Structures are given as C-alpha cells and as structure tokens.
Image (cartoon, rainbow, N blue to C red):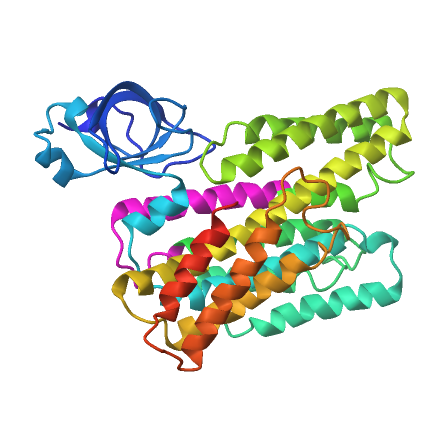
C-alpha cells in the first residue's frame, strides 16, 4: 500500500508547516500487548513510517515519536494492505528517536559542527553589540571592531562555498561604515542574518557526510535543526528588543511599545503550535511569558506605565534565558549522540572525538554554572522549576568519566558507558 495515495507527500517535515493526518496503527510497548488504535492524530515526518504524536491518548503523549517496525508487523501477522496492523514503536521524544533510529559516524559532528556553532555564537555577539553602536563611545566601538575582525581571521582559510559566503558577510560587519562611508550600524544585523543562514545550510550538509544512518534519522536531525532555528529566531528577537532604545529606554513611544507587544504576541501564539518533546515544555513556558509580556506592553502603551514596562522586561529576560538553556541542552544532546554511538558499539570513545567531547562538556558546565551574560542573572532566576542543580553534577561526572578514558584508566570499567549513563540522566530533566 502506498501511503502517498492517502497522506500528503512530505519531502522534509517543517514544524512551522506541519502535515497533519489521522490514521490507524498498532502500538507496541515493552512488555505490553499490541494495542490497536484508530484515528490517531499525527504529524507526518516520513510518509507511512515516522510520525509525531499530536494528542495525549491511550498511553501516548503529545510530542512522542512513532516509528514503524516491519519485523514486529510481520511477527504479529500484519500486512502492508491493512494500516491498522502496521506495528509502531514509541520513542519519548525526538532526541530519543534520533539516537534509537540512527547510528552514525560522529567524527564530523564533533569536529565541524561545534566550530560552526561557535561562529554563530560570535555572530550573535556582533549582532547584539550592533544594536547599541550608535550610542557608545570610541573605546567600545574599537572593541567591537576588534572582535569582528578576530572572527574573520579565525575563518579566513575556509573553502566550502557556504562558509566562504558566511566569511564575506562576517567581514562586512567589521566596520560600522557602509559603502558610501556613512555610519550605518543598522546594516549589520542583515549581514549577520545572511552569514548565519549560510552556516545553517553548511550544518545541514555536514550531517550528511560520513553518515551511517537511515533516512528516518536524517529527517529527525533536520527537524531538530528547524526547531533550533526557531529557538534562535525568538532569542534574537527578544535580544534585539532588550538591547534597543525603542522599548526599554526613555526614547520609547506608544507606537514602538505597541509594535513590540504585537510581535511578542505573535511569537507566543506560534510557539504554542510546536509540540515536539522534549522542547515543548520550554516552548509552552516561553509562550506563556511572551503572551503576558505582550499584555504588559500593550497596557504600558495605553497607560504610559513604566511599571508595566519593567514587568514585561523581567518576563523577556526569562524567555531569553530559557532559549539559551535550550541551546545548551542541544549541545549536550550532540555530545550524547556521539557517546551513545561508542557505547552501543561496545567501544571506548577515542581520538579527536574524545578530546572534543570533554572540552565541550567543560564549556557547557562552565557557562551554565555562571550568570547569563545579557541579563546578568542566574539562568533559572524566576523559574518555577529548577533543573540545573540536577543537571550540572551529572555533566561534571560525565566529563570525569571521559577524562578517565583520556588518561587510559580502565579497571575493567567502560568509562564511555558510564559517561553515557550520566549524559542521558543530565538530558532527561530538560
């Protein structure tokens, strides 16, 4: 049976434009009898074989991932002609599904992807500073120019066409003067966005290099990248508003405050539509904060209320920090994928993968243990639920286990497997 005849064809699933269907299937869970389900509401990831659950029902949770298993379908007497007999296994979230479905070569993941992400982080810094260049002194402008020039220098030998384009756009951010020799820092965010898009495309290309992964795993990685791009978009939008004069300074006007309210409200509504676990929890909290911030800003515009402005600012601080925490969660997941691959092969992590994994864990631990840079607040300041007291010790222990591998310690223990256990536990609270 060809599912393209009853499901709209999906080439690449897009969380912003989901293809939603209802279908029958048989759910297989550990130590449970097969459960035939009718009219399950799903988002299509790969036609006929991979779906995102969109509702809580019959032991399923919104954001679970269902993957078709042909062996179980055959074992339980199913056939392609009877959709209800198709057996599916359930993964709790997209990250678990990615690790379970695809076993891959992690070399490129830990060699190039962190370098691309660091480049994007530096572009974030450049964009953030560009919003205030018009009101800072010569010393701060020189610091900005030095940092942008250093970013260019670090990547001057790139060859890939996407990275060459990103380098050209990064080089254009060094000076606050435009081609007509006018002070024009307003053009810099456009250059940053163009460079960032090229780096995103290079990241997607890298995921296809040296791969030992089936198509479902590739699709899940791209889907996660698109969720990550939405997270970065919201992070930058909030960052821009917090850094500019248009809302949180005496230069604001009712019009600029009202426009910010409308934009934050739109982001709130959009985030509520994204249901992929484990990110849905953070998205739901961010949506609530953005919605409340939008209401405060609307009231501030109507009432000329400085108190409402400050209340909105506190909520946007919290949204920004939650999006930053999601970034660190993604970084942990990238390390976990590589460590999991070695664990499942029954081998210790080695070589450059081992060095880079320990350095990445050290960086994550250090950054999350400090105050967030833009807001100057602890990452979980104002959060109802604090997870870092659980996460940070586990990240430290995982790095310690991998350092034992680096130092050649054994004692009959697979320290890579020990690290795997710690990392899984560290990612779970997110």
Q: Which residues are magenta?
A: 205-234
Measured as percent of width and height from the top left, residue 248 is found at 84, 39
Measured as percent of width and height from the top left, residue 384 is found at 66, 37
Which residue is nearer to you in this view: 256 or 391? 391
Which residue is nearer to you in this view: 75 or 354? 75
- Horizontally, is 321 left or right of 244 in the view? left
Measured as percent of width and height from the top left, residue 128 is found at 72, 53
Question: Is 209 inside the magenta-drawn segment?
Answer: yes
Q: Residue furthest top?
A: 39
Asked whether residue 393 is in view, the answer is: yes
Question: Is 143 inside the magenta-drawn segment?
Answer: no
- Horizontally, is 16 left or right of 375 in the view? left
Please identify the quarter of the rendering in which residue 314 is found.
top right
Give me the residue at 47% from left, 47% from top.
428
What secondary structure predominates along the stretch shown in magenta? helix
Number of on-image labels: 0
Seen in the picture, residue 336 relative to 227 is either above or below; the reply is below
Q: Quarter holding the N terminus?
A: top left
Measured as percent of width and height from the top left, residue 79 is found at 9, 29
Seen in the picture, residue 244 relative to 52 is either above or below; the reply is below
Seen in the picture, residue 84 relative to 66 is either above or below; the reply is above
- Horizontally, is 105 left or right of 109 in the view? left
- Horizontally, is 429 left or right of 263 in the view? left
Give me the residue at 42% from left, 33% from top.
63
């Amino acid at each position: 049976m060809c599912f393209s005849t009853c499901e709209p064809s999906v080439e690449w699933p897009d969380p912003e434009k989901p293809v939603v269907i209802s279908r029958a299937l048989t759910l297989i869970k550990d130590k449970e009898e097969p459960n035939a389900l009718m009219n399950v509401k799903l988002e299509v990831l790969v036609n006929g074989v991979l779906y995102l659950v969109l509702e809580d029902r019959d032991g399923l949770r919104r954001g679970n991932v269902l993957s078709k298993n042909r062996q179980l379908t055959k074992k339980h007497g199913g056939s392609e002609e009877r959709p209800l007999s198709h057996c599916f296994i359930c993964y709790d979230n997209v990250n678990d599904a990615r690790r379970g479905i695809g076993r891959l070569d992690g070399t490129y993941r830990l060699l190039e992807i962190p370098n691309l992400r660091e480049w994007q982080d530096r572009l974030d810094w450049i964009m953030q500073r560009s919003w205030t260049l018009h009101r800072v002194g010569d010393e701060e402008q020189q610091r900005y120019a030095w940092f942008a020039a250093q970013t260019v220098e670090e990547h001057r030998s790139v060859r890939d066409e996407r990275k060459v384009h990103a380098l050209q756009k990064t080089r254009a951010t060094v000076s606050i003067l435009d081609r007509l020799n006018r002070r024009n820092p307003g053009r810099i965010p456009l250059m940053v966005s163009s460079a960032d898009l090229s780096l995103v495309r290079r990241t997607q290309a890298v995921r296809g290099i040296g791969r030992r992964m089936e198509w479902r795993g590739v699709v899940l990685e791209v889907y996660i990248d698109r969720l990550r791009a939405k997270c970065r978009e919201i992070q930058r939008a909030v960052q821009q508003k917090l850094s500019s004069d248009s809302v949180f300074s005496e230069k604001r006007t009712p019009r600029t405050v009202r426009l910010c309210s409308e934009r934050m409200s739109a982001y709130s509504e959009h985030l509520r539509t994204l249901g992929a676990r484990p990110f849905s929890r953070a998205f739901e909290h961010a949506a609530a904060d953005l919605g409340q911030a939008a209401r405060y800003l609307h009231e501030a515009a109507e009432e000329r209320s400085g108190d409402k402005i400050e209340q909105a600012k506190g909520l946007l601080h919290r949204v920004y920090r939650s999006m930053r925490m999601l970034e660190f969660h993604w970084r942990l997941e990238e390390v976990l994928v590589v460590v999991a691959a070695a664990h499942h092969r029954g081998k210790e992590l080695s070589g450059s993968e081992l060095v880079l994994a320990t350095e990445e864990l050290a960086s994550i631990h250090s950054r999350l243990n400090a105050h967030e840079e833009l807001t100057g607040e602890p990452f979980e300041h104002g959060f109802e639920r604090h997870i870092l007291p659980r996460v940070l010790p586990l990240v430290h222990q995982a790095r310690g286990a991998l350092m034992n591998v680096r130092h050649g310690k054994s004692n009959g223990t697979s320290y890579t497997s020990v690290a795997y256990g710690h990392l899984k536990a560290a990612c779970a609270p997110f």
